[in-house]
């Protein structure tokens, strides 16, 4: 039985969206493990996001207490 094409699109399939989000979080945590920290710029470049979108993603993780912020201004970065 063939899978209908509309199930292959991430935006139409909640399970794929969740899996994609999980992979993104794994990539982000792997980066922090290797580098000790991550910045807004790192997130923007890693996922090709705008400044606002990267900040939204970071804020979600901060609210869940999965990341902690350190420093302020241009020196701001995030750790686990």
Image: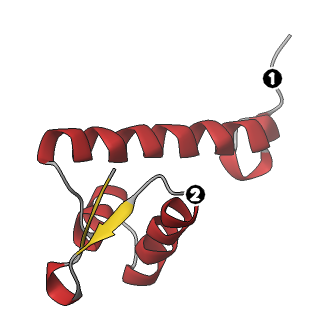
Between 10 and 78, the one lying in front of the other is: 78
Mark 2 residue element: loop
Circle 2 residues within 10 Å: few <14, some 14–19, many ≥20: few
Residue positioned 80% across, 41% down in the render: 6
Relative placement, left or right, of 10 versus 64 is right
Which of these two is toward me, 56 or 77?
Answer: 77
Which residue matches tag 1?
Answer: 3
Q: Is residue 65 above or below residue 63?
A: above
Q: Position of residue 9 (x, y in %)?
A: 69, 44
Establish if 78 lies above or below 76. above
Among numbered discs 2 and 1, the one appearing first in the sequence: 1
Residue extending farthest top = 1
- From the viewer's side, name the closer residue of 77 and 11: 77
Mark nearest the camera among 2 and 1 is 2
Task: State the CA–CA distance, disc 2 to disc 1.
Answer: 35 Å
Which residue lies at the image location 16% right of the left edge and 49% below the top edge? Answer: 36
In contact (CB < 8 Å): disc 2 and disc 1: no
Q: Residue at x 51, y 57 (%)?
A: 65
Residue 12 image offset from top left, x and y in percent:
79, 49
Q: Which residue is mark 2?
A: 64
Residue 67 in the image: state x and y as whole percent: 40, 57
Question: Who is closer to the viewer here, 4 or 16?
Answer: 16
Residue 78, quarter of picture? bottom left
Q: Residues within 10 Å of mark 1 (few under 14, many from 20)?
A: few
**Residue 27 horizontal side relative to residue 24, left or right:** left
Residue drawn at x 37%, y 58% is 47
């Amino acid at each position: 039985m063939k899978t209908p094409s509309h199930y292959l699109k991430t935006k139409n399939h909640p399970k794929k969206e969740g899996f994609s989000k999980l992979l993104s979080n794994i990539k982000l945590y792997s980066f922090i493990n290797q580098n000790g920290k991550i910045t807004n710029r790192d997130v923007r470049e890693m996922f090709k996001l705008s400044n606002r979108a990267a900040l939204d993603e970071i804020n979600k993780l901060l609210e869940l207490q999965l990341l902690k912020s350190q420093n302020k201004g241009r020196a701001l970065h995030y750790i686990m």
